Amino acid sequence: MSLNRRKFLQSTGTLALSSAVLSANASSLFAKHPIGIQLFTFFNIIDDDVKGTLTKIKAMGYGELESAFSKKGGYYGFKPKEFKTLANDLGLTWKSHHVLGAPFKLPAGAKMPAGPDGKPMVIPPMLNLTDNMQQLVDEAAEGGLKYLLCAMTPTGTTEEIKQSIAVLNKTGEAAAKAGLQFAYHNHDMEFKAVDGSVPYDLLLSETDPKKVKMELDLAWAMKAGKNPVELFKAHPGRFPLWHVKDLDASRENIMPVGSGTLDFKPVFAAASIAGMQSFFVEHDMPKDAFASAAASIQYINKNINI
């Protein structure tokens, strides 16, 4: 640029304006979507030091939280407003909370997993949408959440599927009245046919698409042989929330994101089709929750364009 031209731009203020525009464009070009984490990742340790755990989560670079079950019950020993305040004071946004669709039951022949002490876990009675729907909706609204999630619901028989659909629709109505968006989180079991029908297909087709959105657990869907992008295309805008975990080649063992065998790049490329608003890293019962969470966010920051 010539000296005369620079003087001209400076005199008219165009140089300053151009710099501002370039700066804004650069910021938007390299802006990253907030990366969330599902606190079930820290199930074995978070109740021992809730503030300390959240502080470390923030230091890793996570921005959004999705809460789940606590050994203390409720919201890690806090009331909804208290937990929201704690999160916000640490610079974190509490976006959503997981609850059960029906009373908790271990599968036939299953035993409670062992805790860090090697003994079977002891957990307090958990509220569920079948018996405590309005209380759970009211508490989520009290905490200022955007989303209330059904973590799982019985889908092993046709009758269970019918009952679950009724509960989901009822909760969707109540959540909407309270200013919340309700959604359903899958495992792989919902993709296994029951009496000739696939439960997940019925959950999609027989619930209100506006009041019952989906939180797609990408790994469980892929374990079941489903392509998340095809699900997005078949039901655009229905998947505002995702869970992101990785699996090894056997599809039996959960891994930190980027250390397994799942290809997330085409899924994130289809985020706009899905209607994705937030996604949460999750690792069920890892040996070292902090190491897993750190490895996952490092991979996402380096390899995923969001």
Image (cartoon, rainbow, N blue to C red):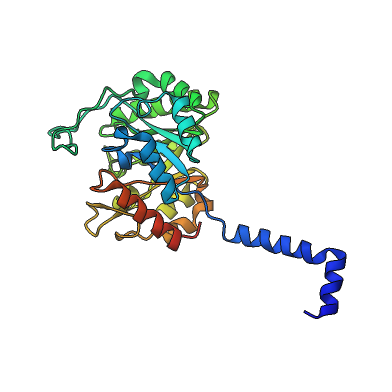
Q: Nearer the viewer, residue 193 or 27?
A: 27
Task: Name which residue lies at 23% across and 48% down.
Answer: 287
Relative height, residue 303 to residue 278 (above, below) = below
Would residue 49 appear left or right of 142 to someone viewing this image? left
Would residue 11 appear left or right of 136 to someone viewing this image? right
Q: Nearer the viewer, residue 299 or 128?
A: 299
Q: In the rendered picture of this protein, how many numbered marks are placed on residues?
A: 0
Q: Nearer the viewer, residue 10 or 26?
A: 10
Residue 298, how many percent across, how many down? 40, 58
Residue 199, how many percent across, how many down? 33, 38
Can you tell which quarter of the image residue 169 is in?
A: top left
Relative height, residue 199 to residue 250 (above, below) = above
Task: Name which residue lies at 67% across and 58% down.
Answer: 24
The reply to whether residue 202 is in sight is no
Would residue 108 appear left or right of 80 to someone viewing this image? left
The reply to whether residue 82 is in sight is yes
Would residue 147 appear left or right of 54 to someone viewing this image? right
Quarter of the image with the N terminus is: bottom right
Residue 297, how many percent across, how many down? 40, 54
Residue 25, how many percent across, how many down? 66, 61
Task: Name which residue lies at 52% across and 47% down.
Answer: 275
Can you tell which quarter of the image residue 164 is in?
A: top left
